[in-house]
Image (tube, rainbow, N blue to C red):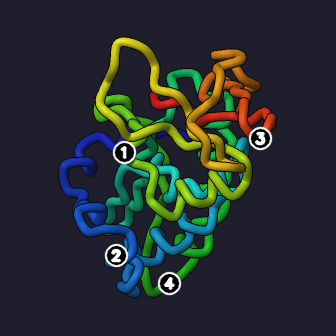
Amino acid sequence: MTTDLGPARSELRSGASAPPAVAAASDGAVGRAWRILAGIVDPEIPAISIVELGIVGDVRYAGNWLEIELLPTFIGCPALELVQATIGQRLEPLRLDPGLAIEQVVVTTSYAQPWTAERISPAGRAALRASGFAPPELTAAEALPPRATCPYCGSRRTILENAFGPTRCRSIHYCTDCRQPFEQFKDG
C-alpha cells in the first residue's frame, strides 16, 4: 500500500506536530484520522492501539492526499501489511466524505526515525501490563539487559527464559515471586 507521492510529498502539511489528543480535537482530516487510528488495535497485541504503541509516526494532509506514516517496531514485522490494510479500510470513510475531498489515503513505512520504547504512551504501557505483557523498561542502557518487571505482581525478580518469543518484538520471562510466565515487548 506504500505509494510514492512524488512532487506532492513536499506540499504535505504535518499534523503530528501536535500530540494526538490535541489533533483529535480538530474536525479536519488530520484530527479525524488520528481519532480513527487511535481505535485500531495492534494485531499481535490487541490490548493496545497502534497510536498507544507509537507506531504512527505522522499524519499529513494536503489538498487531496492523506498520508499516514508508520514506524514499525522491527524491520520485517509480520503484522505490518495487516496494519497497513486495516488503516486503509478504516480511513476509507474519510476519503468518501465530500467535505474533505480526499482522493487518496496513502500508508507509508519509514525507518528514518526508528521506533523506540519511549514512543509507547503511558496508557499503552498500562494496557500492556493489564493484559500480561511487560512493556520495555525506560532505563538507560546497561552492560546487561535490565530485568523485566512482572506485569502480575510488580516484582523485578524475573528471569529471561527466551529472548525470542512468538514474534521478534517479544521475549518470554518468568517471575520467581508469583511464578507466572509472561511476555515482554522488546525495544526496537
Residue wearing tag 4: 98
Dot placed on the residue nearer the N-terminal end, 1 or 2: 2
Closer to viewer: mark 3 or mark 4: 3
Q: Secondary structure at mark 1?
A: helix
> Splitting the image into 4 quarters, where does residue 116 fall?
top left
- Type of the residue with mark 2: Ala
Residue wearing tag 3: 178
Dot placed on the residue nearer the N-terminal end, 3 or 4: 4
Whole-percent x and y of residue 2? 49, 38
Closer to viewer: mark 3 or mark 1: 3
Q: Nearer the viewer, residue 3 or 54?
A: 54
Do labels 3 and 1 touch, CB within 8 Å? no
Q: Is residue 29 left or right of residue 130?
A: left
Whole-percent x and y of residue 156? 56, 36
182 versus 86 height, above or below: above
Residue wearing tag 1: 118
Residue visible at 53% across and 70% down?
95
- Type of the residue with mark 1: Glu
For label 1, the crowd category at 10 Å Cα-Cα, with few meaning under 14, some 14 to 19 and many 20 or more, is few
Residue wearing tag 2: 23
The answer to whether residue 27 of the structure is visible from this angle is yes
166 versus 99 height, above or below: above
- Type of the residue with mark 4: Pro
